[in-house]
Image (cartoon, rainbow, N blue to C red):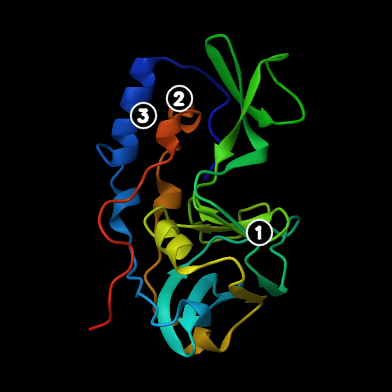
C-alpha cells in the first residue's frame, strides 16, 4: 500500500464513494489477480517458505504446493528478517501501531503514531488485514504487491490472496524466510504477478473506516481434483 495523500476531509459521502472505488467500480486491477489455494489434508503439516530474491511465498503440505503467490518485501533500510520462525499471532482486522492517520475534527492527515501533523487528534493505524505474525512486529498482511522492495519489513500479499493465506496458517505453522528457495526453479518460475501497485491509493476516508476491512465472498480453500 502506498502512502495516502496528506490531508483530506472525511464525510459519510466520501466513505461511500471510497467503498465503491475499493470494490472495483473504477479500480479494475485490484480485482484481476487471484491465486488458487488448496485445502490441506493435514493442517498440522502445512509450512510456509519465502524467497526474497524471487519475492514469492510458497505454502506447502509436505512437498505438495497449496498456494504459490508473489509478495512485497522489505526495503534495504528495513529488510524482511531471514531465518526459521513460526506463526505466533493472527489478527483478521489488524491496524498498524506505527503508521496511519491522525483525525482532528473534519480533517485527516497521514503520519506516524508518535507525532500528530495536526497538532493533536485521534490516531488510526493503516489497515493491515489478515495479519499473520511470525516474529514480533513482523508479519504477512494484505497490501499492494510491488515488484521492488517496498515495505518496512513485513510481507504483503494481494488482497484476494491474503484471506486464503490466513486460512491456511495456524499458530505454530513453520515459516522459513531465505534469500532463495529450491521452489524458485520449479513452481515459482512462471507465476503471474499482480499489478495493484499501479492503482491509485485508496482514499483516506476509506482507510480510517471499518469498511477498510472486507470479507471475501465464496470459499477460500478448494479441494484438489
Q: Secondary structure at mark 1?
A: loop
Q: Earlier in the sequence, mark 1 or mark 3?
A: 3
Callout 1 touching callout 2 (CB < 8 Å): no
Q: Secondary structure at mark 2?
A: helix
Q: Residue, x 28% and y 72% (percent of image)?
A: 222
Left/right placement of residue 165 relative to residue 173 reads left
Q: CA distance from mark 1 to mark 3?
A: 28 Å
Callout 1 touching callout 3 (CB < 8 Å): no
Say whether residue 184 is visible.
yes
Front residue of 82/77: it is 82
Q: Mark 1: few, some, or many residues within 10 Å (few <14, many ≥20)?
A: some
Q: Position of residue 61 (x, y in %)?
A: 47, 84
Which numbered marker is on residue 74? 1
Q: Position of residue 162 (x, y in %)?
A: 44, 58
Q: Earlier in the sequence, mark 2 or mark 3?
A: 3
Q: Position of residue 56 (x, y in %)?
A: 51, 72
Q: Secondary structure at mark 3?
A: helix
Q: Position of residue 158 (x, y in %)?
A: 43, 56
Q: Quarter-wise, where is residue 203 in the image? A: top left
Q: Quarter-wise, where is residue 95 in the image? A: top right
Say whether residue 53 is visible.
no
Q: Mark 3: few, some, or many residues within 10 Å (few <14, many ≥20)?
A: many
State how many labels appear. 3
Q: Residue, x 32% and y 51% (percent of image)?
A: 216
Q: Quadrant of the C terminus?
A: bottom left
- Residue on which disc 3 sits: 18
Callout 2 touching callout 3 (CB < 8 Å): yes
Q: CA distance from mark 2 to mark 3?
A: 7 Å
Front residue of 42/52: it is 42
Relative to 72, does residue 118 appear above or below in the rendering?
above
- Residue on which disc 2 sits: 205
Q: Earlier in the sequence, mark 1 or mark 2?
A: 1
Amino acid at each position: 500500500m502506498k502512502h495516502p495523500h496528506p490531508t483530506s476531509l472525511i464525510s459519510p459521502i466520501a466513505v461511500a464513494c471510497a467503498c465503491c472505488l475499493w470494490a472495483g467500480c473504477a479500480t479494475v486491477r485490484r480485482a484481476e489477480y487471484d491465486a488458487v489455494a488448496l485445502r490441506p489434508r493435514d493442517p498440522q503439516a502445512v509450512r510456509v517458505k519465502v524467497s526474497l530474491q524471487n519475492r514469492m511465498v510458497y505454502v506447502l503440505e509436505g512437498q505438495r504446493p497449496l498456494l504459490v503467490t508473489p509478495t512485497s518485501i522489505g526495503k534495504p533500510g528495513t529488510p524482511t528478517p531471514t531465518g526459521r520462525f513460526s506463526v505466533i499471532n493472527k489478527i483478521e482486522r489488524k491496524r498498524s501501531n506505527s503508521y496511519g492517520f491522525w483525525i482532528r475534527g473534519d480533517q485527516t492527515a497521514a503520519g506516524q503514531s508518535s507525532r500528530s501533523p495536526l497538532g493533536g487528534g485521534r490516531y488510526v493505524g493503516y489497515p493491515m488485514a489478515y495479519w499473520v505474525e511470525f516474529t514480533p512486529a513482523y508479519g504477512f498482511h494484505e497490501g499492494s504487491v510491488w515488484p521492488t522492495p517496498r515495505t518496512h519489513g513485513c510481507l504483503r500479499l494481494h488482497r484476494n490472496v491474503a484471506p486464503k493465506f490466513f486460512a491456511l496458517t495456524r499458530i505454530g505453522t513453520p515459516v522459513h524466510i531465505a534469500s532463495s528457495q529450491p521452489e524458485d526453479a520449479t513452481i515459482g518460475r512462471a507465476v503471474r504477478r499482480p499489478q495493484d501497485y499501479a492503482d491509485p491509493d485508496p482514499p483516506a476516508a476509506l482507510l480510517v473506516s471499518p469498511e477498510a476491512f472486507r470479507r471475501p465472498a465464496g470459499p477460500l480453500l478448494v479441494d484438489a481434483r
